Image (cartoon, grey):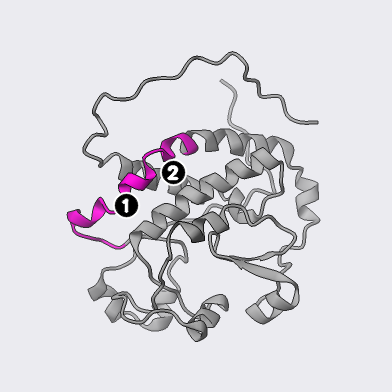
Amino acid sequence: MPAPTAPPTWWPKSVSYSQVSSTEDVSKMTEHDQYRQEPKRRELPAPNSAIMFGLASVGAMSLLILAFFGVMTFYEATIGSSSMRDINPRPCGNSSTEARANGCVFNQLTWSWVPKSCPSYADQEFKEYRDWKYYADLKGEVEANSDIWEKVYNNEMPLYTVKGEHMTHCVHLLLSMAQVVRDDSPTIPKLREYEHIKHCADHLLMKLSMLPDFDKIGTKTPLVSYEQNCQAKK
């Protein structure tokens, strides 16, 4: 078997994921220390009764997870590294003021400022799925207002929300990649962060595996397909 090839030079660096500290530990940290933790969606330790929250809504997501790996292979083969190097790495600037001045909009699904010329991907579907509430504190006592959001937009503080938001984010991130393939549209760097999306796949599978009927026979396999090929588009 040939040795695995190194990832292309334009592929984003791997990101790591860490568990948010418990409420007691968070209270001992300074505001600066709390925010300097890895700014990815993470889950807090919770009683077993909370683990099952929202699982029924992601029952079909295993299909998206399986499809994702083919998506990433497709883009590795079709996106040229030289063209990626020509793209401005910070088209939206370094602040919310600069982002708006540069015609960028905030994409809630990817938690990033994105040029208006980029697709919104599944951001709208993500926001419409539930009226997500975000809070300035871990206990959910201070709901984020416009002033708090402005600090968030400038990376001055994080927000906290329900665990169902994390799972729904993962579902719509995978759905975004399916839209990219369907529409042959360009991608933003966050949609090419393999480690991030693998984290989402692992997270969903872990939650799904805890369903009481996960090991119960009740799934019928589809017909075998003979029409598939992996030829890259010209």
CB under 8 Å between discs 1 and 2: no
Q: Which residue is drawn at 77% across and 63% down?
A: 88
The foreground one among 212 and 14 is 212
Q: Can residue 59 be seen in this view?
A: yes
In the rendered image, residue 191, in percent from the top left (x then y), is placed at 59, 51
Residue 17 higher or lower than 6, as above or below:
below
What residue is shown with label 1? 54
Q: Please give the range of residues in magenta.
A: 44-64
In the rendered image, residue 126, in percent from the top left (x then y), is placed at 50, 56
Which amino acid type is marked by label 2? Ala
| Tag nearer the camera, 1 or 2 | 1
**SS at badge 2:** helix
**SS at badge 1:** loop
| Left-right relation of 220 to 122 | left
| Left-right relation of 27 to 165 | left
| Left-right relation of 172 to 93 | left
Residue 201: give its label: 2
The foreground one among 175 and 113 is 175
Residue 40 higher or lower than 223, as above or below:
below
Q: Which residue is drawn at 25% across and 73% down?
A: 23
Tell which residue pokes out farthest to the bottom in this image: 147
In the rendered image, residue 62, in percent from the top left (x then y), is placed at 42, 36
Give the number of marks. 2
